[in-house]
Image (cartoon, helix red, strand yellow):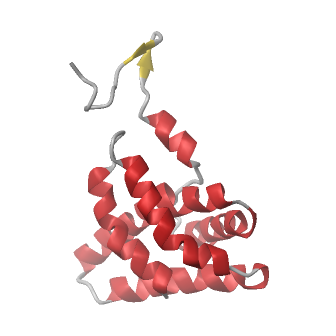
Amino acid sequence: MELAKIIIRSRDYLDKFTYDDYPVCFEEFSRKASFFLDDLQESSINVAADELIGCLERERALLKRRDANKALFLDKQVIALFLSPCCKKAGGKADTFAAVLLEKWNAKYPKNKYYLGTYEDIMKGFDANLLGLPLRKSSKNRR
């Protein structure tokens, strides 16, 4: 499944999970995943979620145990930080797919759960405030 390959290749985005780099990485991921979201059929959402989880699982089965556990965590992060928000942004069938994938993933991996979030929610997470004072700024705008 091509979407599983995109998720695996997108693990590198996690190293760039910063206020400055996340928007660019998110847009790149969205472009790559758009083919899948555009072709998604309402009748096959459950099958697509099962296939994605199965493909990722088969890829991890080729790894040593420690590496497989790390890959599981990385896959979860990519799904939570990139795929799910991308689906939420697309809306419709893609939004339904994100909810079904979440349900199936959390049932299969109860010790490795994730939650649905939007791009906007994630970006707000970078804006830490204490008593109304911003604690983080873009590293490009720091002086």
Residue 89 at x, y percent in the picture: 63, 55
Q: Quadrant of residue 18?
A: top left
The residue drawn where x is 33% and y is 41% is 20
Q: What is the x, y in percent for residue 58? A: 41, 89
- Which one is in front, 124 or 73? 124
Q: Give me the residue at 44% from left, 19% from top.
A: 129
Q: Would you place residue 109 above or below residue 90 in this image?
A: below
Given the current orientation, which residue lies at the most extreme top position?
131
Give the image location of residue 70, x and y in percent.
Answer: 29, 68
Residue 128, position in %: x, y? 42, 25
Q: Nearer the viewer, residue 109 or 15?
A: 15
Left or right, residue 142 beside residue 123: left
Residue 59 relative to residue 132: left or right: left
Total marks shown come to: 0
Which quadrant of the structure image shows residue 46?
Answer: bottom right
Left or right: 65 in relation to 126: left
Whether residue 2 appears in this view of the structure is yes
Instruction: Point out the residue furthest to the right here.
Output: 43
Q: Quadrant of the C terminus?
A: top left
| Residue at image point 34% right, 87% down | 61
x 39%, y 48%: residue: 22
Q: Is residue 5 above or below residue 90?
A: below
- Residue 112, can we see it? no
